[in-house]
Amino acid sequence: MAKEHALLSTEIVNRGVESSGPDAGSPTFSVRVRRRLPDFLQSVNLKYVKLGYHYMISHGVYLMTLPVLIVIFGAEIGSLSKEQLWQKVWEEASYDLATVSAFFAVLVFTISLYITSRPRPVYLIDFACYLPPEENKVSKEEFITLARKSGKFDEASLAFQSRILQSSGVGDETYIPPSVFAPGVNCATMKEGRAETSAAMFAALDELFEKCRVRPKDVSVLVVNCSLFNPTPSLSAMIVNHYKMRGNILSYNLGGMGCSASIIAIDLARDMLQANPGGYAVVVSTEAVSFTWYTGKRRSMLIPNCFFRSGCSAVLLSNRRTDFRRAKYSLEHIVRTHKGADERSFRSVYQEEDDERIKGLSISRDLLEVGGHALKANITTLGPLVLPFSEQILFFAALLYRHLFPTKQSAATPSASTNAPYIPDYKRAFEHFCMHAASREVLDHLQQNLDLTDANLEASHAVLHRFGNTSSSSIWYELAYLESKGKVRAGDRVWQLAFGSGFKCNSAVWRAVRRVRKPTKSPWLGSIDRYPVGN
């Protein structure tokens, strides 16, 4: 029970003066109880640490043997003088043409086999983010005004959404399709969904192909992810039809995978490129706001209305070695975590109908807690792959000590512990952070638990304020922000982290192969100088 209470925070809310009833004229208050992220300092699961080290060892064991052989060979050579070494090489050894030819043949064969068998690096050539038209721009005040005029909400629902908006971190320049505010019209139709997604996807792809100077017919792999809108034919088929792509293209359409789906799509595209080397892969990430829109009265289903906004990203990947010179980034690692086996995690973000059979996306009170557990498992697995050796030694030693010499925690003070594990400093592993811009509350908890600075989360807060929660594409708007600020230099490491329904938490690590210049086309043109918001 004490452990459960430690995950709760309370807040007293002034509801104003009671207007009717036996208590008319009296001030009223309510106590709001919220869940927060679990304290990472008190709960690190050893199995995820083992998984991270397993990934590292399985990929690095062959390279680790090379230094050992060099040391042994060097020690042998170092024990000989120049005269002795010359005598062994030229005087005591006898060579013939067949021996020398066989030696070089084996050497060339071994090197060729190693080069052809190792996975090709995957490069990110460029990416594009969709900038919706100005007529779709809606401020927080206009949001409530248009929602009231639509006649779809009662005053209690409007007041609730207004309170959520004020503390959401969402600014006054986000984009919403006009169809959701149309009076007496169901916006979640196939026609509206196709119109919304096609406008976003085709605009992003047009910009991508122009930037990269690549023809649509050159694309061999296409992966599209959209969580809630999944028509037949699929969104990927819509793109193939619009651009008249090749007949043997490998196309995939991912649905229902939430805000972390873009990293899942990148992982799938990487696997397809490894199986079919020498081609281009395009990853499109979007969401249909008209299908997240809810017009009922259940408050847990009204929350998505306040955060989700229009957005789309298109990414071009390649594993051609000749593309290294023009690529922006190389893909270093992808770590995926799925907590769907746990019932609370599975139902934390859940599409369903309310009592009036109105469909919507329900956000559970447990979302922060289950998201924290998924995040903890993900970063614990990621740590051994990216952290400096000094950080890994400190973390592993503290973790080992904690398991060898456990101490019981007091029921009164469950967060106090004399052997709390050392949490690594992830700021030493990455220069840039692209954390999914879900809400201000989520970003604040991430900053506190990962000990990040305001500068580390500048891009995430800027995207949330300027574009809102654009679902799976938000991490690309954040990378576009970093590029528009001119912050990405050669060798910099970028950590993209996103989480979504299921419940899933996924990480992608990129390394800049060159200094990235400020782009001439970006969704941030015209607004980048106004950020960070503190300016």
Image (tube, rainbow, N blue to C red):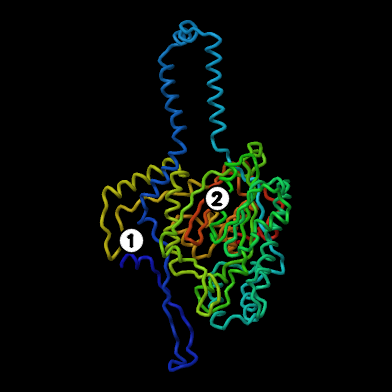
- For mark 2, what is the residue? 432
Q: Secondary structure at mark 1?
A: loop
What amino acid is found at the position of numbered circle 2 in the picture?
His
Report the disc number at residue 415. Answer: 1
Q: Is residue 534 something that shows in the picture?
A: no
The residue drawn where x is 56% and y is 67% is: 169
The residue drawn where x is 41% and y is 20% is: 75
User: Residue 454 at x, y = what percent?
Assistant: 52, 57
Mark 2 neighbour class, 10 Å CA radius: few under 14, some 14 to 19, many 20 or more: many
Q: Is residue 109 toward the left or the right of residue 372 in the image?
A: right
User: Residue 222 at x, y = what percent?
Assistant: 64, 51
Q: Please report whichever mark, 1 or 2, sits nearer to the chain's N-terminal start.
A: 1
What amino acid is found at the position of numbered circle 1 in the picture?
Ser
Q: Quadrant of residue 3?
A: bottom left
Q: Is residue 418 toward the left or the right of residue 294 in the image?
A: left
Q: Residue furthest bottom?
A: 22
User: Residue 455 at x, y = what percent?
Assistant: 54, 55
Figure quadrant of the C terminus: bottom right
Figure quadrant of the N terminus: bottom left
